[in-house]
Image: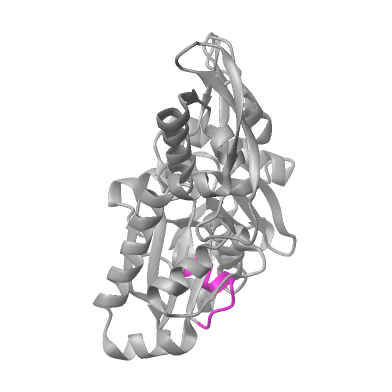
């Protein structure tokens, strides 16, 4: 009782936060201010004294370009913490950046996590946040946060399906009555899609490219479904036969070929979810359609591919990258009424 009273008092003086701690990007929402940070989840660390050289966008620019005395690390792997110490330091850096300075009272935070997260991984997220100066941590499953972020009335007794394709995981969930009636997560998402392009270039063109070059090609000409006209881009890398840097021009058709395997895995998870849910929820989804969020929603034609495979209408929000942090922020803003959607 006393602890609750203190928390109530502290909340009046602290700046509460919502965070999407993603494999690719970290986003932070502050009550009454909105989204105040959107940066890559990358940290550059000095090998000599373990000090931080750069975090976020500046650190991402260093990836693949550092010397032996600097390492660039992505501490979030497949949506969960892979390097506890670096994640803790990254969170501290971002918090200092958005809060300008530490307040006397520590903030409360709502964090989005994948549906496949284990108890050990949950504890790692909570511990890293508390060590970074957070008073009270609440976890919410990413598809639930994304559903709230796109405006789905999650409290109603009706089924809504949401597919969130992030950097490390693809979450498929059917939501009803403020809970996930069916949820499945597969660790195939944006990163695996980028790596499939890297593998394709090496096998088909004997060209060794970096994962960020693969990501750039995906964004420029990548598609899951044939588009009107042909798109091309120049890809630069190292010829594995001659050992000499070179560039070649590839088409969107080749990118589609490269993406077949990861996209087939994602479609299989969606179809499995549709097969396993009760008939009443199936009827609701037939009426309401499917919502597609996360960075993967930006892949050209992915909505059309899902529509073709499922025969259901697919909706993409205006800015699918922000769905989770917007939803986590909405939970934070109306926490007494929305806290039931958080993980116990």
Q: Residue at x 44, y 50 (%)?
A: 189
Position of residue 116 relative to residue 172, above or below, is above
Residue 147 falls inside the magenta stretch: yes
Please provide percent x and percent y for residue 73: 50, 28
Task: Pick the quarter of the image with the C terminus.
Answer: bottom left
Q: Which residue is most to the front?
A: 229
In the shown orientation, is residue 257 left or right of residue 9? left
Residues 86 and 174: in front is 174
Q: Nearer the viewer, residue 4 or 329?
A: 329
Q: Nearer the viewer, residue 339 or 79?
A: 79
Magenta span of residues: 144-153
**Residue 10 showing in the rendered view:** no
Q: Residue 90: in sight, yes or no?
A: yes
Front one among 231 and 91: 231
Magenta stretch containing residue 234, yes or no? no
The x, y position of residue 308, in whole percent, is 44, 73
Left or right of 241 in this view: 63? right
Left or right? Give the position of 274 relative to 250: left
Residue 7, position as x, y percentages in the image:
54, 61
Q: Is residue 319 above or below residue 135?
A: below
Q: Work out whether 109 lies above or below 340.
A: above
Picture layout, residue 60 above or below residue 251: above
Residue at image coords 60%, 29%: 248
Query: Which residue is rendered at x = 51% and y = 33% of the image?
Result: 211
Q: How is the image coloured?
A: one colour
Where in the figure is residue 175, as x and y percent of width and height? Answer: 40, 77
Q: Name the quarter where the N terminus is drawn.
A: bottom left
């Amino acid at each position: 009782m006393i602890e609750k009273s203190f928390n109530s008092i502290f909340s009046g003086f602290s700046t509460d936060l919502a965070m999407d701690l993603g494999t690719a990007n970290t986003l932070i929402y502050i009550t009454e201010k909105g989204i105040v940070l959107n940066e890559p989840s990358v940290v550059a660390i000095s090998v000599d004294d373990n000090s931080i050289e750069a975090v976020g966008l500046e650190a991402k620019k260093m990836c693949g370009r550092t010397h032996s005395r600097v390492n660039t690390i992505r501490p979030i792997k497949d949506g969960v913490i892979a390097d506890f110490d670096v994640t803790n330091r990254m969170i501290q850096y971002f918090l200092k950046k958005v809060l300008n300075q530490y307040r006397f009272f520590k903030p409360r935070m709502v964090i989005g996590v994948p549906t496949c997260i284990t108890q050990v991984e949950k504890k790692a997220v909570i511990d890293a946040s508390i060590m970074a100066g957070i008073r009270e941590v609440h976890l919410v499953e990413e598809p639930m946060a994304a559903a709230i972020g796109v405006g789905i009335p999650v409290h109603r007794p009706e089924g809504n399906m949401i597919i969130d394709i992030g950097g490390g995981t693809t979450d498929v969930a059917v939501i009803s009555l403020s809970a996930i009636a069916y949820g499945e997560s597969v660790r195939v998402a944006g990163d695996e899609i980028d790596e499939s392009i890297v593998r394709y270039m090496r096998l088909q063109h004997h060209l060794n490219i970096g994962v960020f070059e693969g990501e750039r090609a995906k964004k420029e000409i990548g598609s899951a479904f044939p588009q009107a006209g042909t798109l091309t881009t120049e890809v630069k890398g190292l010829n594995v036969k001659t050992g000499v840097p070179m560039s070649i021009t590839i088409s969107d058709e080749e990118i589609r070929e490269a993406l077949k395997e990861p996209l087939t895995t994602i479609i299989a998870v969606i179809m499995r979810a549709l097969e396993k849910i009760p008939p009443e929820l199936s009827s609701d989804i037939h009426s309401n359609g499917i919502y597609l969020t996360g960075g993967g929603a930006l892949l050209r034609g992915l909505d059309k591919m899902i529509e073709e495979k499922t025969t259901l209408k697919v909706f993409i929000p205006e800015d699918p990258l922000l769905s989770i942090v917007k939803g986590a922020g909405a939970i934070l803003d109306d926490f007494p009424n929305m806290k039931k959607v958080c993980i116990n």
